[in-house]
Image (spheres, helix red, strand yellow):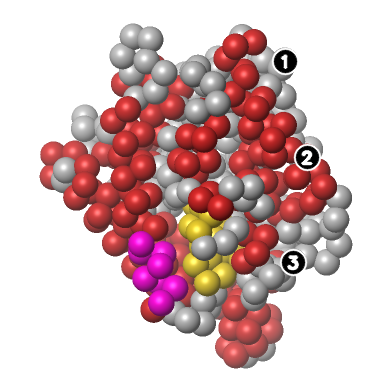
Amino acid sequence: MDCETKLWLVVFFFLSATYMQQRCVVGVPQVPCFFVFGDSLSDCGNNNNLRTDAKVNFFPYGIDFPAGPTGRFTNGKTSVDVLTELLGFDNFIPPFANTSASDILKGVNYASGAAGIRKETGTHMGEDISLGVQLENHKVTVTQITQKLGTADQAQQHLNKCLYYVNIGNNDYLNNYFLPEHYPTSREYSVDQYGEALAQEYSTHLRDLHALGARKFALIGLGLLGCIPQEISTHGKNGSLCVDEENEAAILFNKKFKPQVDRLNKEFPDANFIFINSAVIQQDAANTQDLKADIICCKVRPDGICIANGEPCKNRNITPFFDAFHPTEKINLVIAGSYYHAPVSNYAHPMDISQLVKL
């Protein structure tokens, strides 16, 4: 156990001091509103009432979250929750599914567990809210904000100042391309073709989001998919640290998507798009120690989700994964800290979130 936790301790101590220093300086939010699009890494309850196996509104999820199980796929805060604190908000951003009593002028979270860029992604588990539908939900919010502020111009002025965070695409591989028993994409596309098609489709959605008033985009790239415990257990070879094929696909997608970000910045000079390279962040950490990071905190079902009402591990502060897919709160703290203030220049292009929100 001591050997297997070194990787995450290295990353944690490298960035946690920066996070704590930033967290202490709160007050007026750095942006007036924060809108979130994505998958289970960001979902805070949008899947709770869907007919899907991809929902976690039960113990032991939320064991370290003040409100208990809320639909967050971790033991405590997600990376989005940590970013919300770093940005200076007093309250977490509410899920679109439960905004009736919320101040939507400060933002909404549309993320959905198992969702992807492609509309069919993750649907073998049941219903989810794809990126395209998340944008449709945002249109509803924009209409409500327009009604609250009085005119479309006032709404646009407000939205132009907001931070738009998009972290999606992981499931287009995990719950699509690498599940040939459920989806035909791996037979229809080579890995290179699929990455190109995904990057193009993603860019189209971002153009639509710009048309709705978004101007500050934080776009999170894919992580090292092959180092997720569930992928190692289902697709790895005996003793393999990670599934190379899946990591290579994620890295290839990031390489294809980064130039799209540059094109969007040229196409829309009134906006700023930044790219956070999650795979590089994880890769740099992995290079410090030659070990596997497949330690999880709860007993899981065959699909990698925690067994309901099971007893989680006690050492959640040093365990990298809570279930077989999702990081613990401590790792989310580190991840969000590196997104907000990138300690290495190639983590964020052309700037990090702390610089973006100042523009």
At mark 1, the secondary structure is loop
In 3D space, how far apart are the residues under numbered discs 3 and 1 (Cα atoms)?
A: 35 Å
Identify residue type, mark 1. Answer: Lys
The three-letter amino acid code for the residue at tag 3 is Gln
The residue tagged 2 is 17
Q: Is residue 80 above or below residue 267?
A: above
List x then y, in percent, for residue 348: 53, 54
Query: Residue at the location (41% across, 18% down)?
Result: 241
Label 3 belongs to which residue?
30
Using the image as rendered, state which of residue 327 and residue 64 is in the foreground: 327
Left/right placement of residue 302 relative to residue 318 reads left
Residue 133 horizontal side relative to residue 305, left or right: left
Q: Which residues are magenta?
A: 259-266
Residue that extends furthest to the left in the rendered view of this protein: 188
Q: Majority secondary structure of the magenta segment?
A: helix
Given the image, on which type of amino acid does mark 2 rest? Ala
Residue appearing at x 21%, y 30% in the figure: 181
Label 3 crowd (10 A; few <14 / some 14-19 / many >=20): some
Nearer to us of marks 3 and 1 is 3
Residue 91 is inside the magenta segment: no
Secondary structure state at the residue bearing disc 2? helix
Between 116 and 349, the residue placed more toward the observer is 349
Name the front one of labels 1 and 2: 2
The disc, 3 or 1, on the residue closer to the chain's N-terminal end is: 3
The crowd level at tag 2 (other Cα within 10 Å; few <14, some 14-19, many 20+) is few
Q: Is residue 117 above or below residue 144?
A: above
Q: Is residue 97 visible?
A: no
Q: Which mark is residue 314?
A: 1
Residue lying at 50% horizontally and 28% vertically, measured from the top left:
287
**Can residue 221 be seen in this snapshot?**
yes
Residue 105, relative to residue 125: is it above or below? below
Alpha carbon distance from label 1 to label 2: 23 Å
